[in-house]
Amino acid sequence: MRLISILQTLALTTSFARGIATDFVDKAIKLMEESPLLDTHIDLPQIIRSLHRKPLDAIPLLNGSFPGHVDIPRMREGRLGGAFWTVWAPCYDVVGEDPGLDFNTPTSHVRDALEMLDIIQNMIARHPDDFQYARSSAEVWDAFNAGKIASLIGMEGTHVLGNSLGALRIFAQLGVRYLTLTHTCHSAFASSCGPGTPIDVVHEGDGLSELGKELIKELNRVGIMVDLAHTTVATMRQAIELSEAPVVWTHAGARALWDHPRNVPDEILRMIGDGPGQKDGVIQSIFFPTFLGPHPGVNVSHVANHIEHIAGIVGKSRVGIASDYDGMNLVPEGLEDASKYPNIVAELLSRGWTDDEVRGALGGNLMRIMDKVDEVSEKLKDRLPSSAIWEKRTDLPSLKWGGGGQHTYWPVDVKANVEKMYLRHDEL
């Protein structure tokens, strides 16, 4: 049985190289012109910020040839129907900022996240003939039917929240549609699987902190999708169990096919479904070769192998596509940039996927999950916001906010109460 499995895998991974999928490209393009392909992870905003002292000045250049994997001409050629642009800032070690073991030392991440969101908003505003803002599935279809690329917002990593549920609520108001619980570093909320090598455990059980558990509830309440890419298995398991809404992996692969900590193990995939004890969700398959197989040599067929393995456990109604374009230093053969999306669709068609199954993988499955997350949010609309704070914060109550040693900004009775609080602290 093992030999048969290996031979089948070899046959599948060479199908693209033999040109089988090319016979299906025309059909793929036709389907993509009828149903939107939603890519849940494109890092174009960080390319804009990385290349330009004044990032907003670079936005008009997207209409021509632009460095990286993505620009408007290539997205149009690739028939991209919609994209989640990522609000992201590198983890602490990359930018040389150390939040300390308690995550309380201030960093620039909240500022950087806001500036990234500003880039996305201006991308949409400066290219109204090509981009249209969307948050819901209905708005995705509105944009697609208008001939625009639906533009949604994802946020990658809770290290950009400044340990604050209040910051999360503001980002929700600004249109963030999913939140990846970690990037390659731990946060005050959750445990990360790291950059590919082990990192020290900071939370009990290497999963969610108590504040992270409150975060899951808030995400459900405000209608932001819980994204489990980059997290530890323990974080995945706890989040699935806690969430009242479906969960997502916005860019991941199957660990059974390539044993990398960024990929989803079968034991976790089996928690996704509509059976007893399962949670609905969708797993969007990544293009990054590091997570797909031995490289060089990774190609379109490897991506399809991961999609099919995941679909074999969770069903074809719970899979989708997530490139990670502009966020990876390697690309698969046949998926070199945003002009090549039809190749992965053609590969699935060559393997016998029906038109309806392909429409689901393009974006229908994800939009169904988005609708369910919105339904849960609507049911929870009367729930009060969580008042939880990071337990290791020392700035609350704000005993020094009255101004100077004389607390000159406070009313007399407030000053008296604060001084009593100081007295209690002294007595301790």
Image (cartoon, rainbow, N blue to C red):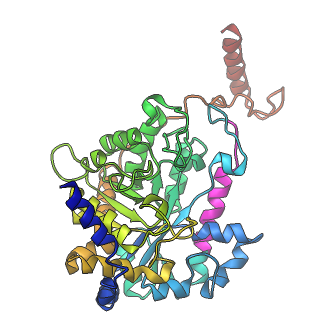
Tag count: 0
Q: Residue furthest front?
A: 3
Q: Residue 8 falls in which quadrant of the image?
A: bottom left
* Residue drawn at point x = 26 percent, y = 76 percent: 358
Q: Position of residue 370 (x, y in %)?
A: 34, 63
* Residue drawn at point x = 20 percent, y = 77 percent: 352
Q: Residue furthest left?
A: 276
Q: Position of residue 271 (x, y in %)?
A: 25, 47
Residue 427 visible: yes
* Residue drawn at point x = 73 percent, y = 31 percent: 411
* Residue drawn at point x = 55 percent, y = 41 percent: 187
Residue 128 visible: no
The chief SS type of the magenta part is helix
Residue 127 as seen in the image, left or right of residue 97: left
Q: Position of residue 239 (x, y in %)?
A: 37, 43
Magenta segment range?
105-122
Name the quarter where the C terminus is drawn: top right
Identify which residue, 380 or 76, lies in the foreground: 76
Q: Position of residue 161 (x, y in %)?
A: 58, 48
Figure check: 8 above or below 229 = below
Does residue 292 show up magenta in the picture? no
Figure check: 1 above or below 152 = above
